[in-house]
Amino acid sequence: MKPEALLHPRPEGLYCPPGDFFIDPVRPVERALITHAHADHARAGHGAVLATRETLDIMRLRYGGDFTKSKQVAELGKRIDLGGVTVSFHPAGHVLGSAQIAVEAKGLRIVASGDYKRHPDATCTPFEPVACDVFITEATFGLPVFVHPDPESEALRLAESLRQFPERAHIVGAYSLGKAQRVISLMRSVGHDAPILIHGALAKISRYYQGRGIKLGRLEPATVEGIGGTRGAGQIIVAPPSVLGDRWTRRFADPLSVFASGWMRIRQRARQRGVELPLILSDHGDWNELTMTIRETGASEIWVTHGREEAIVRWCAINGIAARPLHLVGYEDEAE
Ligand SMILES: [Zn+2]
C-alpha cells in the first residue's frame, strides 16, 4: 500500500479513504479525528468526533454541548478499528489532552502528530515517540535559528522582574488554552505562591485543568472595576495576548507588558507589540526538538505540515530521509 492511499491532503484536511475520516479538518465533515482542542485544529460542526477525553471536554467548554452529533473517547494507546484501518492516539506534549494519531493498514503506519513539543510541561502528558513508516510533523519553528531556552529560566526572569518592580502589575499575555496554564504552573514551580489574577477568558479552561489534577495554585478573577491605583501591583495577571496594549490593562497599576510565546525569540515582534518583558515559551518544538523527533520515529518518509516546511524538508534530504511539504492550509500559529 502506498502511503498516499492511506492518508492524503484534501481541502478539508488530511483524509483517510479506506477509513473514511479526516484528521483535524478545517471544514465540517462526517467523521473527524482531532489531535487537540486548539481552535484551528478542533472546529465545531462535524458529524462525529473521535478524540481524547480532555480534547472533547475542552471542545464542549468552548463550543457548547452540541459541537458534534456524536463523539467517542480515544484512550491513549488503545487501538480502534475504523473500516479496516487501525487508529490509536499517543501523547503529543502540546496542551492538555493533545495527541498524535497513528493510522495503520496492511503493515503501513503513518503518524500524524498535530502540534507537539519535547520541552518539559507539567500541565500535560509528555510526548511519546511512535515508530512509524511516515511521520507527519508540524514546522512552526522549523528553522535552525529557533532554539527555545529552558522554560524554568524564562519563569525565573518573570519572578526577577516582580522583585525588581513591585509597584507594577505584570500583565502576561498567553494563549488561553495551554500556554496560560503552563505559565501559571511554571511560576508555581519556581516558588511563586501568591494568588495569580486571571482574565475571564481563561477562567473556564483553567478551572478545567485544575479539575483534571493540574496544580495551578490560587487563581483569582482579574475582573475589577475602576482605573489605576495600586491594583495588581507586584502581581501576575494572566490574560489573552490580545489585551496587551489594550485599555483593559489600564485598570492595573503601571502595567508591565509580558508576552509568553515562542515568537518572542524575534526581538522585532516583541517591539512591535510593545512587550517590555518577552518570555520565550513555546508549546511547539524548536529546531532541535523537530529534528530529534524525526530521527526517533525511525520514519523513512516525512511529510511536513504548517510552518517553515522548506528548512525541515532540506534537513531531511541532507540526512537521507525522503520528505515533502503537504501544503495544508487553515492552521495558524500566530497565537502560539
Ligand atoms: Zn496547537
Image (cartoon, rainbow, N blue to C red):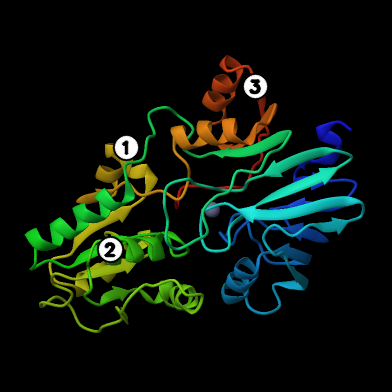
Kind of residue sitting beneath label 3: Ile
Classify residue 202 by image quadrant.
Answer: bottom left
Whether label 2 lies within 8 Å of ligand 1 gets the answer no
Query: With 176 as the anchor, is 305 left or right in this view?
Result: right
Q: CA distance from mark 1 to mark 3?
A: 30 Å
Classify residue 108 by image quadrant.
Answer: top right
Return the x and y of residue 190 as percentages of the image width and height. 24, 61
User: Does any portion of residue 118 appear in the rendered image?
Assistant: yes
Q: CA distance from mark 2 to mark 3?
A: 40 Å
Kind of residue sitting beneath label 2: Met
Dot 3 crowding, Cα within 10 Å, few <14, some 14–19, many 20+: some
Looking at the rendered image, the disc whose residue lies closer to the viewer, 2 or 1, is 2
Query: With 116 as the anchor, is 86 left or right in this view?
Result: right
Q: Is residue 137 above or below residue 50?
A: above
Kind of residue sitting beneath label 1: Ile
Identify the residue under disc 3: 321
Dot 1 crowding, Cα within 10 Å, few <14, some 14–19, many 20+: few
Return the x and y of residue 257 as percentages of the image width and height. 23, 58
Secondary structure category for the residue under label 2? helix
Residue at the (57%, 60%) spot, across then down:
39
Dot 2 crowding, Cα within 10 Å, few <14, some 14–19, many 20+: many
Tag 3 or tag 1, which sits nearer the N-term? Answer: 1
Q: Is residue 142 above or below residue 221?
A: above
Identify the residue under disc 2: 187
